[in-house]
Image (cartoon, rainbow, N blue to C red):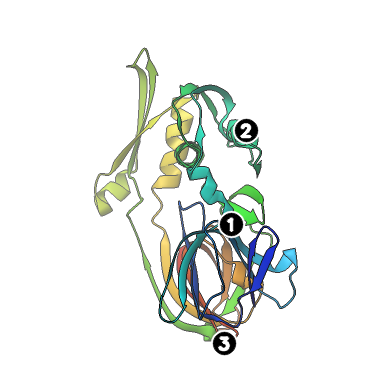
Amino acid sequence: MKVIYGKESTRYDLTSPSMELSWSSSRGQIAQNLDIWIKDAPPLQSAGFLMLFSGFELKESQQFFHGPIVRFDRDNKTGDLNATAYELSWYLQKNSAPRIKVNGDAGTELQRLIKATGINFSCPAFGFTVKERISPQPFTSLFTSFTEQAYEKTGFRYYVQHQRDKLSVLPEGANSVVPMFRANMLESSSTGESIEEVYTVVTVEKYKDDKIASSVTKENANLIKQIGRMETIIDAGEEKSLDFLATKQLTNLSKIPKTRSITVKHEDGNAARLRAGWLLKILEKDNVTVTDWIVTSCNARWKGGQYTMDLQLEGRP
């Protein structure tokens, strides 16, 4: 692994003096954060960039973190420095979208607004239309609002994949490289299920002049008996078929997902890029069964040439 600092023409190789290094991501968090402890650190500056590479060559294909230092503390006696950096998309929360009218597919409109600021940002169509005048808000809030609506109306979740200064919005599980861990690599593993985001009743409402014009409710009667009544109300927006939307979302939201918590140690440079939103596979103990999981949170550390990752997973049907 290589740890590089850059600010304008200044470059420091921090690989050797880095005593502790950890980074994390979670579902709904756009930018990964990085914490680093550097022994007797050279003079670093706020907004200087930290760059992590899984190999020993500074190749873009091996880079898995790229972002500014947002805070640091230097010990006045030892010269040691503790710093926190975020990926480049951190700047999306430091800049706001103006009060502007959006009219089109939510993903397309999101891409249009963010690209207009000069950021290299790509986003697929989300499959539903937004037609409103948005209030001034950080771009991260706009991203969260539109992706939450996407989950409500389509059942798809999205995350932001970073490649240096290029930001790409992808559906969960759309990573091009899919790591596979063998069960005997797992230092710990526990499985279960969660109903925290499960709903047994879905109501879709359409409004006109701030009043309900029409409404459709769908229920999963068997699941209501099993786990209770839990209802979510969805604003249909520009969607015309309320019945279709309610039926589709009840199907999506009334599934009880399998969960898994694992700790794995590895030296795989490709798996070093794991983040929330990625698909990974596990070859189970029988060396035959392969299971698919979506990473919902990743807490990673690097020491002595080895990655240690604590992963929270959600089963992929």
Q: Residue at x 26, y 53 (%)?
A: 227
Q: Earlier in the sequence, mark 2 or mark 1?
A: 2
Identify residue type, mark 1: Gly
Percent from the top left, x then y, of residue 241? 49, 24
Q: Horizontal and vertical percent for residue 75?
A: 41, 75
**30 or 70, nearer to the observer:** 70
Q: Mark 3 or mark 1, which has the lower sequence index? A: 1
Q: Nearer the viewer, mark 3 or mark 2?
A: 3
Residue 173 circle label: 1
Q: Which amino acid, by three-letter code, is at mark 2?
A: Thr
Query: Which residue is more in the foreground, 224 or 162?
Result: 162
Q: Which residue is mark 3?
A: 304
Position of 62 with respect to 260 (left or right) is: right
Residue placed most toward the observer, 251 or 11? 11
Residue nearest the viewer, comparing 192 with 311: 311
63 sits left or right of 205 in the view? right
Marks 2 and 1, how far apart in space? 20 Å
Q: Are marks 3 and 1 in contact (CB under 8 Å)?
A: no
Q: Amino acid at mark 3?
A: Gly
Residue at point 65%, 72% (across, down): 12
The residue labelled by disc 2 is 108
Frontmost of labels 3 and 1 is 3
Marks 3 and 2, the one that precedes in the sequence: 2
Confirm whether residue 285 shows in the render. Answer: no
Image quarter in which the N terminus is found = bottom right
